Image: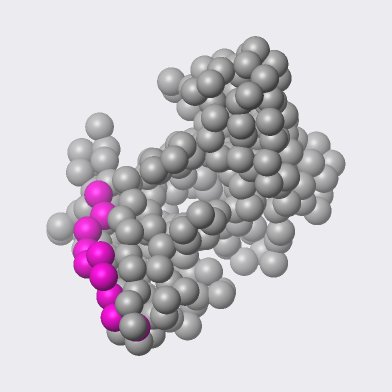
Amino acid sequence: SYVLTQPPSLSVAPGQTARITCGGNNIGTKSVHWYQQKPGQAPVLVVYADSDRPSGIPERFSGSNSGNTATLTISRVEAGDEADYYCQVWDSTGDHVVFGGGTKLTVL
Amino acid sequence: QVQLQESGPGLVKSSQTLSLTCTVSGGSISSGGYYWSWIRQHPGKGLEWIGYIYYSGSSYYNPSLKSRVTMSVDTSKNQFSLNLNSVTAADTAVFYCARGLTYYDSGGYRDCYFDLWGRGTLVTVSS
């Protein structure tokens, strides 16, 4: 089955840019979706279809996808961005949902 | 505004069946284009997709859980449900119901992402 690989953790200073990667075989041919999960809360969709943002999500959140890596970029990081971030794709070979292992973003 | 709410026992004995229900409010579960889904999260771990069901009753399950999972939908109550049998301590997790929005991408391939989630409910399996 399809595997998505994320770095377990990433630390960024406030005001800097965080880039969270999601690796997968030819992931650039798939649409990637990203979720933010804060402690004790349900996940929230922050980017869908590689680079679209749901209403209410700040423009600081953006996404890209090419080759074997998709990236969630958070510009001008704030303390409130500290959370776990998960990437997700639809595996069409089996009509399955696949999640990455998640990346814990720490704001220094 | 559509909302999802999980309900069910917070404690299940080992070898028995875990049963949860998700109630959809503020919208109809019979609206096309959505896969009504269950996702779980073991304590301190990542997200694991369990499966989904369409309002018509067709369903797909995670292959790793397929032998133990059954999902159903009750359109008259605007609810969908999860049954996970033969549970063990390894099934202790927070269970989320979620709405999977389905569409066809620019290449004509079906895709799905979760635009709405319930708050989640912790289910503990005890011996």
The magenta stretch spans residue B65: no
Depth check: give the residue in front, A63 or B11: B11
Say whether residue B11 is magenta.
Answer: yes
x and y percentages locating residue A62 in the rendered image: 64, 24
Quarter residue B12 falls in = bottom left
**Which color scheme is applied?**
one colour
Tally of numbered discs = 0
Q: Is residue B107 above or below residue B65?
A: above
Where are the magenta residues, as a range? B5-14
Q: Residue at x 69, y 67 (%)?
A: A1
Question: Where on the picture, by quarter, is residue A44?
Answer: top left
Question: Quadrant location of the C terminus of chain A?
Answer: top right
Is residue A108 in view? Answer: yes
Q: In the picture provided, is B16 more to the left or to the right than B107?
A: left
Within the image, what quadrant is residue B17 found in?
Answer: bottom left
Q: Main secondary structure of the magenta part?
A: strand
B38 vs A11, left or right, is left
Tell me if residue B32 can be seen: no
Q: Residue at x 68, y 25 (%)?
A: A12
Image coords of residue B127 (percent x, y)? 34, 83
Q: Which residue is more in the foreground, A97 or A100?
A: A100
B76 with respect to A50 (left or right): left
Is B36 displayed left or right of B46 in the figure? left
Task: Please name the residue shown 56% across and 74% down the image.
Answer: B63
